[in-house]
Image (cartoon, rainbow, N blue to C red):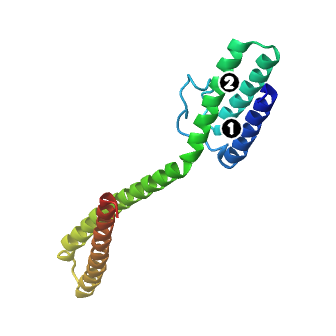
Amino acid sequence: MSTQTLLQSLEQQIENLAREIEPIAHTPAQQARFDVTLFASKGTRLREYLAEVRVNFAQLCQVVAENRSAQVAFVAERLVSQITALQRELATQTLRNADKQKERQSSDFYSKLVEHQQFERRLMAMIQDRESNLGKLATFSEQQLMQKELAALEGRLMRCRQALIKIERSIERQERGF
């Protein structure tokens, strides 16, 4: 194969990679995706790494045209490593998304658990407050009204505890892998 054919094939591979990256090219990661020895870019978006691949391809074309064989080997090897790394990154996106979704689900259960535990504490405090005030009420109608409030609060507390049990079971199932 001629050098020109190899360069065209490499350019086609880069363009195919660009098309595959396009849907997620602008999505940032929490930290740099690759080691600094592989990519000079410290960005968190795939488009930044793809831009570096394109710059390196242009550099490869230039050193080929200038017939500098030692630099051709170095730049070509680096370019192939970068393309391979980007392809691996693309291949793992579905796994990363699934992990993020599980992580989000897990944190949702725990945040719901905390929220419901706070509801339970507040309801118990409200019930204690109403019970202590019940004996201090003077009229029978005020006592009846307070007892209705207490019954409603106790019903809410019961439903809150049932929700807590469901959330705890969901967390257990998730931790067991079901």
Q: Are marks 1 and 2 in contact (CB under 8 Å)?
A: no
Residue 96 has which mark? Answer: none
Badge 1: residue crowd in 10 Å (few <14, some 14–19, many ≥20): some
**Amino acid at circle 2:** Ala
Residue at point 43% right, 52% down? 103
Q: Is residue 95 visible?
A: yes
Tell me which corner region of the image, top left, top right, bottom left or bottom right, holds residue 118. bottom left
Front-lying residue, 94 or 174: 94
Furthest-front residue in view?
1
Between disc 1 and disc 2, whose residue precedes?
1
Residue at point 57% right, 41% down? 89
Q: Measured along the vertical axis of the image, is residue 87 above or below residue 124?
A: above
Front-lying residue, 102 or 4: 4
**Amino acid at circle 1:** Arg
Q: Distance between the residues labelled 1 and 2?
A: 20 Å
Instruction: Decide if residue 96 is on the left or right side of residue 121.
Output: right
Q: Measured along the vertical axis of the image, is residue 79 above or below residue 160?
A: above
Spot occupied by residue 145 in the image (x, y as percentages of width and height): 29, 83
Q: In which quarter of the image is the N terminus?
A: top right
Q: In which quarter of the image is the C terminus?
A: bottom left
Furthest-left residue in view?
135
Q: What element carries label 2?
A: helix
Q: Is residue 118 visible?
A: no
Q: Is mark 1 on a helix, strand or loop?
A: helix
Front-lying residue, 160 or 124: 160
Task: State the residue position of label 1.
Answer: 47
Task: State the residue position of label 2.
Answer: 76
Spot occupied by residue 176 in the image (x, y as percentages of width and height): 30, 60
Tell me which corner region of the image, top left, top right, bottom left or bottom right, holds residue 123. bottom left
Q: Measured along the vertical axis of the image, is residue 157 above or below residue 66?
A: below
Instruction: Decide if residue 88 is on the left or right side of residue 148.
Output: right
